[in-house]
Image (spheres, grey):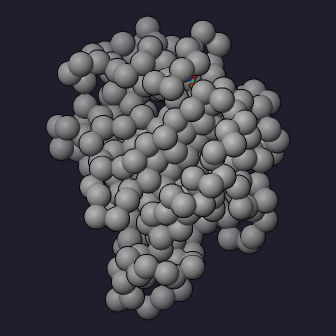
Amino acid sequence: MCRHAAWLGAPRTLASLIHEPEYGLLTQSYAPRLQRYGTVNADGYGMGWYGPGQDEPVRYRRTVPVWGDANLPGLARAARSHCLLAAVRSATVGMPIEETATAPFADGRWLLSHNGRVDRDAVRDLADDLPGGAESPCDSAWLAAGVFARRRAGLPLGEALAEVVVHAGAKDPGARLNLLACDGTSLAATAWGDTLFFHDSLHGSPPGDAREDLLHRAEDPGGGVLVASEPLDGRPGWRAVPERSLLLVSAGEVRLRPL
Ligand code: GLN
């Protein structure tokens, strides 16, 4: 099972998801604490972020372990955004190890990562939903294709994730379907078969009207929501997302609902 993490809030660097926290994705790649399937995440990594004034994200994916890319620490310190997503991969048996099979998958403004597995025969229709098909024969890319097809049809981020997860879960009861997606202004994630946590330092602390302002203020060091397969650090305030639920994060609120 791979591990993934995302941030929405005051601008910060990708290093804040990968290298800086005690249990960031770098540590989670070789010593995850809560991983239920697989032991290391060494089959590649990927990340995406939204540059200033850019609608579509920048994406960077490699098939080397996250600890094996000497260029990454500098890049991750420089790549800075109010919306970030990164993942380290433990490939499911039979899935190709190549960049196109590595999260995040992308379509327009949307980025998506998947922790888990699904029987591709059960969800062939999802890959076919997207004109041009999935980016890769990897099961995760097929789920991404189903989500992206729904995005193009106008479904909101959370609804697209929910529909694909419930559909795939019905077709393959053994599937594990933790999806994490963002579009630059919101995050959505599902817990379905593996762990998922979030840490909210945005909502509740500033008075209501200040929230939007906080999200867009350039140099605020705090103010945001982290979503991750497992907590990135030992701070209090990490909350587990209940199994079979959908987490929705925007500037205005964090919402949880059952799937
Ligand atoms: N099935 C996906 C892959 O092969 C995700 C694997 C995982 O979560 N370990 O990449």
Residue at 49% over, 63% down: 80
For the C terminus, the image quarter is top left
Picture layout, residue 92 above or below residue 179: above
Question: Which residue occupies the foreground of this view, 101 or 247?
Answer: 101
Q: Residue 163 location, x and y as percent?
A: 34, 36
- Seen at 66% across and 29% down, the residue is 64
Q: Name above or below for residue 109 compared with residue 164.
A: below
Residue 4 x, y percent position in the rendering:
59, 44
* Quadrant observed for ligand 1 in the rendered image: top right
Q: Is residue 224 above or below residue 131?
A: below
Q: Nearer the viewer, residue 230 or 20?
A: 20
The answer to whether one can see residue 247 in this image is no
Q: Position of residue 250 (x, y in %)?
A: 38, 65
Front-lying residue, 240 or 38: 38
Drawn side of residue 188 relative to residue 2, left or right: left
Residue at image location 65% in from the left, 13% down from the top: 93
> Hey, which quadrant is residue 210 in on the image?
bottom left
